[in-house]
Image (spheres, coloured by chain):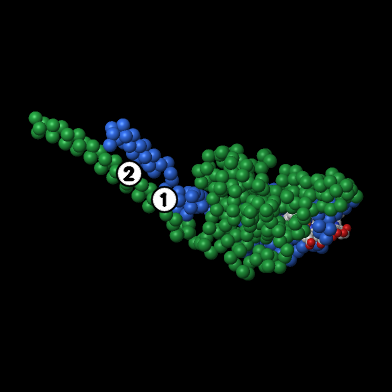
Amino acid sequence: MIGEIKMKLSRREFARIGCRVIIGATAGSAIIESIVTNSVASEDPPKGEYDWKEHLWGYVIDTRKCIGCGRCANACKLENEVPFDEPVYRTWVERYRELKDKDVKIDSPNGGINGFIDDVPAEEINKAFYVPKICNHCENPPCVQVCPVGATFSTEDGVVLVDYKYCIGCRYCIQGCPYGARYFNTEKGTADKCTWCYHRITKGLLPACVQACPVGARIFGDLKNPESEVNKILDKERINVLKPDLGTKPKVYYVGLDREVR
Amino acid sequence: MQPHLKKAFTLLAIAIIGFIVVRSFIVPVSFGQYGWYRGDAIIDSMNFEIRHAGSATCGEENCHNSIYSIWIDSKHKTVNCETCHGPSEKHVNNVRIMPEPVNDTRDFCGMCHFKSAARPEEFPQIDPDTHGENLRCAYCHNPHKPWFV
């Protein structure tokens, strides 16, 4: 009688303990494995000859030089497979015209790709100039903060990229960007943006827009290299960034920016 | 411990294990390698295809060396070959693949040179209505060296 009860109890006990041990061991090892394999930041830069720890990219736009030919925006679309038949741009050129009556007209027909037509007589214009726009690759990127799945991120060398295989297309980042620098790529079904031609700069080439600019209004270089042209301009010129009060810390620096430019 | 609590704990444990197992399947291996993103995405971005080869490539030995050598000390030396001729990396890799035909209309040169109020004044601009008698610009100017006589 006592033996029987003991037997029953111990069988149950055995099953219970066994279950707990199995559950505990699986959970424990799974947790440890997930921590070990994923969350530990690796010290190794991406494979290949390019060492991203040696660079921090920066971009200077000299608005005083821009002639508004739009070859930058055109070259960008060609280099990066940005759809031509949609009004989406990784970089574009805006035209600012302050009229005599202090009215400010801002336009960017097709991003400037087809050039600009003077539709206001020169006599009515106080001042007019072009402002090239591009992703600012902020040090504090709002778009990265709002991405729910980690499909957009800042690299060690200071570039904000999109993971096209991982993006779920929720468009939060497009809403989150205060510069309107992101767009939805209907061909890929993901958010998309300027990469500063990451495939080019990591091979020692210039971004396509910088190469296309005929007047040197776009200057690209390494902020970690004291001899680079961007650093020389940052040392010498009066520079500005767009919407500095937002605290995004852009890495696109403007020379000769007018107070009207937003 | 009371049985309903035990049941609850067991269910919780199963739920946690289920979560971890499912997570280990759907989270990519390289996620978290450098930060809260997929490390391999960087490699994907680096491996995107290059389209613009650069003017120096055009000027290589046995290629467009003569055009390159007049262009390099012309007023147009800041206008790269591919700005007019289009992306040509494919052509560089296989000379049978020709770049897009060049746009030799007046309007193309005009995107840079037609008079415009917003352009810096010192940039050379012309009035399309009076300059060049409505002829193609290349009729008088060599696009590779605008002041070639």
Chain of the residue under the numbered disc 1 shown in the image: A
Query: On the rendered image, what quadrant is the N terminus of chain A found in?
Result: top left
Say left or right for A68 vs A17: right
Is residue A241 in view? yes
Residue A193, percent from left and from top = 61, 47
Say left or right for A120 vs B94: right
Identify which residue is drawn at 79% across, 53% down. A129
Compared with A253, B129 (above or below) is: above
Q: Colour of chain A?
A: green
Spatial CA span between label 2 and label 1? 16 Å
Q: Check contact, mark 2 vs mark 1: CB within 8 A.
A: no
Task: Using the image as rendered, state which of residue B144 and residue B4 is in the foreground.
Answer: B4
Chain of the residue under the numbered disc 2 shown in the image: A
Residue A27 numbered tag = 2
Compared with A219, B15 (above or below) is: above
Amino acid under disc 2: Ala
Compared with A79, A7 (above or below) is: above
Is residue B67 in view? no
Residue A182 numbered tag = none
Q: Is tag 2's residue or tag 1's residue first in the polypeptide sequence?
A: 2
Identify which residue is drawn at 85% across, 48% down. A102
> Which residue corresponds to mark 1?
A38
The chain drawn blue is chain what?
B
